[in-house]
Image: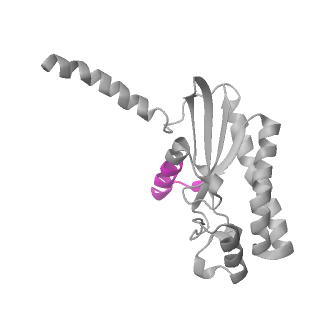
């Protein structure tokens, strides 16, 4: 009986380690060029969307910007993916768009970012990456926290402070919306990138 238990311990340890492999860990060496490419995309995609949203806010106000965010953000992510060869998407623990639900790796990254921010880390500095096995191939995964910008609270802030047109638009487009209650600087979600090695 003792020998069976002793033999089972290494097998159990291997299973536990395998289960942890998909979760983001401390950053490790990235394949040459991958980290620079990911960081560049993580800087340009949100900045481009912020420019488009600012223009629309100035033109038609927050309710109009919701439509633009709903249409333009996925289009911009697709365009960045096609241009770069990376899979680009946004996800959040409190998603607005039903397509923005994180997978297990993304959820672990977001939870880790929240823990780091609660410990005092500056949200704009938070990133993580890892090489993972997906269906028998090696994939480089990268995540960059997306802090809530001051202009974002017009649609993502406290519900009691949202304008009536914004509330009506959110109810019409996103009846299961979970993406309100944010303050500037809080982590709203993250940009996630992945590319086969």
Task: Write down the quadrant of residue 29 in the picture.
Answer: top right
The residue drawn where x is 25% and y is 22% is: 8
Q: How is the image coloured?
A: one colour
Query: Quadrant where the C terminus lies?
Result: top right
In the depicted structure, whether residue 154 falls above or below residue 15? below
- Percent coordinates x, y for residue 162 in the rendering: 65, 79
- Percent coordinates x, y for residue 146 in the rendering: 63, 55
Query: Quadrant where the N terminus lies?
Result: top left
The residue drawn where x is 52% and y is 54% is: 121
Tell me if residue 56 is in the magenta stretch: no
Could you tell me how many numbered marks the image carries?
Answer: 0
In the depicted structure, whether residue 169 falls above or below residue 185? below
Of residues 25 and 117, the one drawn nearer to the viewer in this rendering:
25
The residue drawn where x is 63% and y is 53% is: 100
The residue drawn where x is 46% and y is 32% is: 21
- Percent coordinates x, y for residue 96 in the rendering: 63, 62
In the depicted structure, whether residue 54 falls above or below residue 131? below
Magenta region, residue range: 110-123
Instruction: Point out the residue furthest to the right here.
Output: 59
Q: Is residue 91 left or right of residue 44?
A: left
Q: Is residue 60 left or right of residue 95?
A: right
Tell me if residue 111 is in the magenta stretch: yes
Of residues 66 and 46, the one drawn nearer to the viewer in this rendering:
66
Type of secondary structure dominating the magenta stretch = helix
Q: Is residue 154 left or right of residue 13?
A: right
């Amino acid at each position: 009986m003792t020998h069976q238990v002793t033999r089972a311990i290494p097998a159990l340890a291997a299973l536990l380690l395998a289960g942890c492999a998909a979760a983001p860990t401390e950053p490790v060496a990235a394949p040459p060029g991958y980290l620079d490419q990911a960081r560049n995309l993580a800087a340009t995609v949100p900045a481009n969307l912020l420019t488009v949203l600012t223009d629309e806010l100035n033109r038609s106000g927050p309710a109009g910007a919701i439509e633009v965010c709903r249409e333009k953000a996925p289009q911009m992510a697709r365009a960045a993916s096609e241009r770069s060869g990376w899979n680009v998407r946004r996800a959040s623990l409190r998603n607005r768009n039903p397509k923005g639900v994180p997978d297990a790796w993304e959820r672990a990254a977001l939870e880790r970012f929240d823990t780091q921010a609660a410990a005092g880390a500056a949200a704009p500095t938070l990133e993580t990456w890892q090489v993972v096995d997906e269906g028998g191939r090696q994939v480089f995964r990268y995540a960059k926290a997306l802090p809530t910008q001051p202009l974002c609270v017009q649609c993502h802030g406290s519900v009691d402070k949202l304008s009536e047109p914004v509330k009506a638009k959110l109810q019409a487009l996103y009846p299961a919306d979970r993406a309100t209650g944010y303050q500037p600087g809080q982590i709203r979600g993250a940009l996630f990138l992945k590319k086969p090695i």
